[in-house]
Every structure is written in C-alpha cells, then in structure tokens.
C-alpha cells in the first residue's frame, strides 16, 4: 500500500514563520540578557529564511534559496561578531544586563 504525500499549504509556512518571528521579537523586547537577545535575533532571521524558502518552493523560483543562503551567511557573521562583543564587554561582569552597557560611556 503506497501513501501519497500531500504538499503542505503555503499558509502553514507563513503561520509557522510568524510564530517563530514573534517569539524572537518577544525575546528581544522582554529579555535583557545579551545572549538571549542574540538567540532571539537568530530566530527572527530563521523565520525570514523559512518564508524565503517556502515562497521559492511555491513559485518554483531559485531566488529564495539564494536569499536564504545570504541571510544564513549574514546571521553567522552577526552571531560571531555579536558574541565576541558580548564576551569583551561583559567579561568581568557578574550580572549581565544590556542596560548596563550605557553606564560604560566615558
């Protein structure tokens, strides 16, 4: 007995992407830990990637795959540089809070 795979509707991808994106927005807005904020920004990047790939599949166009690859590249650079900055700024701090960075102005 063979089972046919039904394609997933584009609306499901859009809904999942919106949920992931707003989880990322909530993480950036509600949390003050810079590492959690970086992870939330990565969630937002991944939500955008999901939409790029879903629309590329729906429209039979490879441009979405190219954009997703570029977004992944930028996200990797952002994560590496952002993590380096967070480690450099908060190396000696006991409590890590983004609002404390403003106190470091000279």
Image (spheres, rainbow, N blue to C red):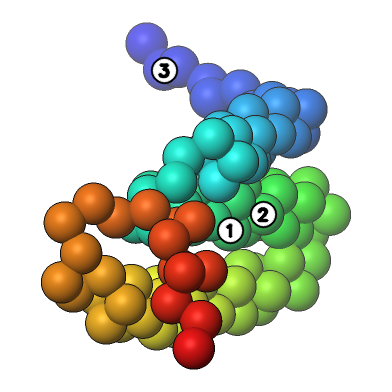
- Mark 1 is surrounded, within 10 Å at the Cα level, by few (under 14), some (14 to 19) or many (20 or more) other residues, namely some
Local SS, label 3: loop
Q: Quadrant of the N terminus?
A: top left
Residue at the disc numbered 2: 48
Work out whether 45 lies above or below 84: above
Q: Position of residue 23 (x, y in %)?
A: 56, 33
Q: Is residue 23 visible?
A: yes
Work out whether 39 lies above or below 81: above
Q: Position of residue 82 (x, y in %)?
A: 41, 76
Local SS, label 2: helix
- Mark 2 is surrounded, within 10 Å at the Cα level, by few (under 14), some (14 to 19) or many (20 or more) other residues, namely many
Q: Position of residue 105 (x, y in %)?
A: 51, 81
Front position among marks 1 and 3: 1
Residue at the disc numbered 3: 2
Q: Position of residue 78 (x, y in %)?
A: 47, 77
**Circles 2 and 1: CB atoms closer than 8 Å:** yes
């Amino acid at each position: 007995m063979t089972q046919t795979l039904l394609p997933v509707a584009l609306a499901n991808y859009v809904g999942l992407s919106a949920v992931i994106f707003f989880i990322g927005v909530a993480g950036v807005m509600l949390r003050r830990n810079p590492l959690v904020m970086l992870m939330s920004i990565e969630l937002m990047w991944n939500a955008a990637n999901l939409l790029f790939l879903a629309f590329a599949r729906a429209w039979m166009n490879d441009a979405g795959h190219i954009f997703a690859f570029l977004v992944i590249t930028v996200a990797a650079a952002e994560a590496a540089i952002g993590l380096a900055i967070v480690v450099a700024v908060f190396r000696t701090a006991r409590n890590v809070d983004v609002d404390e960075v403003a106190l470091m102005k000279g």
